[in-house]
Amino acid sequence: MSSDSLQAGDPAPDFTLPDQHGRVRSLADYRGRWLVLYFYPRDNTPGCTAEACGFRDRKDELHTLGAEVVGVSTDDAGRHSRFAHRHDLGFTLLADTDGAVARRYGALWRLGPLRLARRHSFLIDPNGRIARVYRKVHASGHGTEIAADLRDVTTKAAT
C-alpha cells in the first residue's frame, strides 16, 4: 500500500520522534485516546501559525472529546520549542527532521534540497486506526473542521 493511499480504517503508521521538550513520543503513547496528527511545513510561517493557533483555540474542546493534538514538521525540536512558547500552543510538536514519518503518511514534500511536510492531517481512533484523512487542508478553520468531525465520529461510536 502506498503511503499516499492511507484511508479511513487503515492502521496508522507507527512513529517515534522527539517533541519540543526533547521527550521521545510514539503512536503507542496515544493508545486509548483520539489523536489529531497534523503535518505542516514550517514553524512561524503565516499559514502554519494560523493552523497551530486554531488547534490551540480548540484544545479544550478537543480534549473534552477525548483527543490529543500532535503537530509534525521537519523542523528541529529547538525550533518547535520556540514556536510553541511564542504562541502558547500547549500541545505536542514532533521533530521529523529526516521526513521519514511524513513519508510514511504520504505528507513529505521535496522542494529541491528541502524536505517539508505537506499540510495533511489524520484523525486516529483510540485503537490506532485512521478514522479520517485530510489531504486538502486549509490552515484557517482546520481546528474547527477537526472538532466537528471528532464530535461526529464520537457520537456515532456512542450509539
Image (cartoon, rainbow, N blue to C red):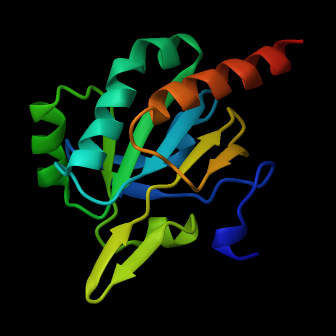
Measuring from the top left, give residue 43's x and y in whole percent.
21, 51
Task: Identify the residue at the far right of this view.
Answer: 159
Relative to the observer, which residue lies in front, 128 or 7? 7
Q: Is residue 125 above or below residue 57?
A: below
User: Could you tell me which quadrant the C terminus lies in?
Assistant: top right
Look at the picture and state if 88 lies above or below 70. above
Task: Give the percent coordinates (x, y) of residue 80.
Answer: 19, 48
Q: Is residue 68 above or below residue 118?
A: above
Is residue 53 shown left or right of residue 159? Answer: left
Q: Position of residue 112 (x, y in %)?
A: 29, 89
Confirm whether residue 23 shows in the render: no
Residue shown at the point (32%, 60%) measured from the top left: 41
State the residue at coordinates (9%, 43%). Answer: 82
Outermost residue, bottom direction?
A: 112
Residue 127: percent from the left, percent from the top?
A: 72, 37
Nearest to the observer: residue 139 or residue 5: 139
Residue 97 makes an appearance in the image: yes
Q: Quadrant of the N terminus?
A: bottom right
Number of residue marks: 0
Q: Quadrant of residue 100?
A: bottom left
Quadrant for residue 39, please give it.
bottom left
Q: Residue at x 62, y 40 (%)?
A: 123
Residue 63 drawn above or below residue 68: above
Q: Is residue 133 left or right of residue 18?
A: right
